[in-house]
Structures are given as structure tokens and as C-alpha cells.
């Protein structure tokens, strides 16, 4: 017995024979087939048809059954196909059963339809899987437009913000970063190239570099809290004691006290300036002088010819 699925259209072949000889004989008398459902006295005729002498073979008949619920069929039921109109060799064959079938009544069909992993459950799960997979790109994984994989990926441009928490090590070279980097949180172990060590050196060594021009608008606050804050006493001592030091040209503001140099104050610098302002250089590198005392003894004359020094 054949088991079909509700909604199927299937074909059933049968042979009609002469009663006297058993020879295949044409089904005649404008034949009609009907289908009878178990425990139902009302035959089904909708969607039932027959073709006689199929393929020009005498006595070979083809029944066509459209087994839809609209035609009266139901799952789990058994059916018989019988001749409701027709003769063979002039003898009526009405009531002759020519085939039987069931609809989703086999053990496998019942298990598939009704089990916890049955057809309905499978369809539901499949639909849920399809909903998820519909979000996946159609491109091959790793290719342009495809999902990222653990391996080689095609160059991909992300046009929207990308936020991620990265754990582990990032290995490889970053060709360039275009645009501003808002912030980097956490410790940076090392940076290859220009680093803080390239800038870490004594202030005196930086200022003593040939060609360095000290700023003329350096204020007391800048000296106290800026580039001078890490200088040593030796740095300032050397700068103030060397005529060609890097302090040449720097104006120290009124009231400025260089506390880092022992004993040297702004007042001391003022006294030195007052004294050096009186120096006159008529001849380069030679100080014009009017000597009045030698070893605390007053002298006369100018030291020129005809005006010798003397007590």
C-alpha cells in the first residue's frame, strides 16, 4: 500500500482483464473512478480521473488522484480506489477495487509529523535558522564584503564607529593612522622610533647647543615652572659665569630671584650690571680705565706719557 503526503498528486496504474479468458481488455462504458475513505460512506470524486489503454496498451489504465484537503482528503487516513462506472468485455466491473493508499499514515510519517523532532518542529527550527543566516553577507568569508575570519581578510573599510574591547597582543605593522586619536588609556609599554628617551637630557646640554637662541620674552613663571624646573645648580652656574653662555640676551625680570644658585640673587645681578655698565671699550677687548687707587693708595696722573702715576 502506498503512503503519500497530503496535497500530493499521484498516479496509480492497474490492469483490466476479461473474466472468461483473463486477457487484458479495455475498460469501457465511459469509465469513472471514485475514492472511498475509511469509515466514510460518501465517496470522493473530486480530483479523480482515469485514462484507459495507456500508451496504446490494451487493458492498461492510469488513475490520477489529486489528494488535497480541498478535495476531501486528510492526513492519517486510508483510501480505496474503485471503479464506479465501467465495463470489461461487456460485463460491469462497478465496485472493482483497483488500488489503495494512505496519507501520512506510515510509522515514519507519523514520527516525522508528530514527534518532538517532527516535521513541524524541523520547519520551525529551519525558519529560525534562516532568519539568522539572512543577516550574513553573500560574499565568501574573508573576501571583500564578507565576514571577518581568523586568517587573511580582504581590505575592508569601516564607515561607521567601531567599538571593541581588545584583549591580548596586536601583532604586525600599522601603516598609518589618519585623523585625530582621542586618547590612549593605560600604559604604553614601548614605542619604536621617536620616544621620550630622545628628549631626556640635561637642560644645559640642550641650551648649550651651537646656534641656540634663548627667547627674549622668557618670564619668571616660565623659568620657575617650565623648561628650567629640572636644571641643576651647575647648569645655572655655568650659564651665568661664561660670557658666551646661553643666558646671553635673556632679560631677568624685576624682582626675579634665582634661588637654585647659592648666594646669587636678583640684587646681586643688579649690582654687577651697574658696575659693568661703567666699562668703556674704545679699543676692542681693552677696558678704558681711570685708575685712582693702587693697593688702597691714592695715585695721581693718568698713566699716559707726561702724566705718570705716583703717590
Image: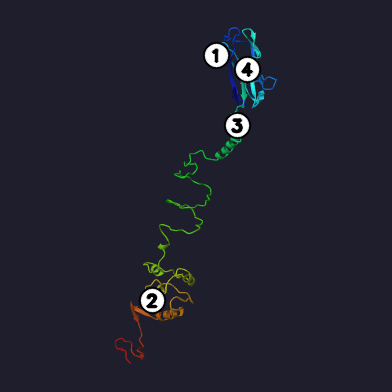
Query: Which residue is at 34% across, 80% downward?
Result: 287
Q: Mark 4 to mark 2: distance in Å?
A: 124 Å
Q: Mark 3 to mark 1: distance in Å?
A: 39 Å
Provide the residue designation for mark 1: 55
Residue 248, label in figure: none
Residue nearer the viewer, 184 or 37: 37
- Of callouts 4 and 1, which one flags the residue occurring earlier in the amino acid sequence? 4
Outermost residue, left direction? 305
Provide the residue designation for mark 2: 241
Q: Mark 2 to mark 3: distance in Å?
A: 105 Å
| Disc 3, SS | helix
Q: Measuring from the top left, give residue 29's x and y in whole percent.
A: 64, 10
Query: Which residue is at 59% across, 38% downward?
Result: 128
- Of callouts 1 and 2, which one flags the residue occurring earlier in the amino acid sequence? 1
Query: Which of the two marks, 4 or 3, is nearer to us in this view?
Result: 3
Residue 111, label in figure: 3
| Disc 2, SS | helix
| Disc 1, SS | helix
Query: Which of the two marks, 4 or 2, is nearer to us in this view?
Result: 4
- Of callouts 4 and 2, which one flags the residue occurring earlier in the amino acid sequence? 4
- Residue 98's place in the image compared with 311, above or below, is above
- Residue 203's place in the image compared with 122, above or below, is below
| Disc 4, SS | strand
Provide the residue designation for mark 4: 49
Assign the C terminus to one quadrant of the image. bottom left
Q: Measuring from the top left, give residue 271's x and y in whole percent.
A: 43, 81
Amino acid at each position: 500500500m502506498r503512503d503519500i503526503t497530503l496535497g500530493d498528486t499521484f498516479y496509480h496504474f492497474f490492469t483490466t482483464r476479461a473474466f472468461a479468458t483473463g486477457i487484458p481488455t479495455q475498460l469501457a462504458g465511459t469509465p469513472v473512478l471514485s475514492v472511498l475513505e475509511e469509515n466514510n460512506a460518501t465517496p470522493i470524486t473530486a480530483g479523480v480521473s482515469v485514462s484507459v489503454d495507456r500508451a496504446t496498451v490494451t487493458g492498461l489504465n492510469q488513475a490520477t488522484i489529486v489528494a488535497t484537503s480541498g478535495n476531501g482528503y486528510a492526513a492519517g487516513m486510508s483510501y480505496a480506489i474503485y471503479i464506479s462506472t465501467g465495463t470489461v468485455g461487456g460485463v460491469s466491473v462497478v465496485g472493482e477495487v483497483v488500488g489503495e493508499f494512505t496519507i501520512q499514515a506510515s510509522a515514519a510519517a507519523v514520527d516525522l509529523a508528530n514527534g518532538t523532532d517532527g516535521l513541524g518542529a524541523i520547519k520551525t527550527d529551519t525558519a529560525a535558522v534562516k532568519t539568522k543566516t539572512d543577516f550574513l553577507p553573500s560574499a565568501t568569508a574573508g573576501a571583500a564584503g564578507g565576514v571577518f575570519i581568523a586568517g587573511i581578510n580582504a581590505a575592508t573599510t569601516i564607515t561607521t564607529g567601531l567599538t571593541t574591547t581588545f584583549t591580548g597582543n596586536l601583532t604586525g605593522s600599522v601603516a598609518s593612522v589618519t585623523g585625530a586619536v582621542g586618547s590612549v588609556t593605560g600604559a604604553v609599554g614601548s614605542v619604536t622610533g621617536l620616544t621620550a628617551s630622545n628628549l631626556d637630557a640635561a637642560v644645559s646640554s640642550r641650551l648649550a647647543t651651537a646656534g641656540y637662541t634663548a627667547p627674549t620674552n622668557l618670564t619668571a613663571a616660565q623659568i620657575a615652572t617650565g623648561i628650567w624646573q629640572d636644571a641643576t645648580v651647575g647648569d645655572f652656574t655655568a650659564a651665568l659665569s661664561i660670557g658666551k653662555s646661553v643666558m646671553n640676551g635673556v632679560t631677568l625680570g624685576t624682582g626675579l630671584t634665582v634661588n637654585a644658585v647659592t648666594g646669587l640673587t636678583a640684587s646681586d645681578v643688579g649690582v654687577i650690571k651697574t658696575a659693568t655698565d661703567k666699562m668703556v671699550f674704545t679699543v676692542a677687548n681693552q677696558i678704558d680705565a681711570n685708575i685712582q687707587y693702587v693697593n688702597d693708595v691714592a695715585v695721581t696722573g693718568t698713566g699716559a706719557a707726561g702724566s705718570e702715576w705716583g703717590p
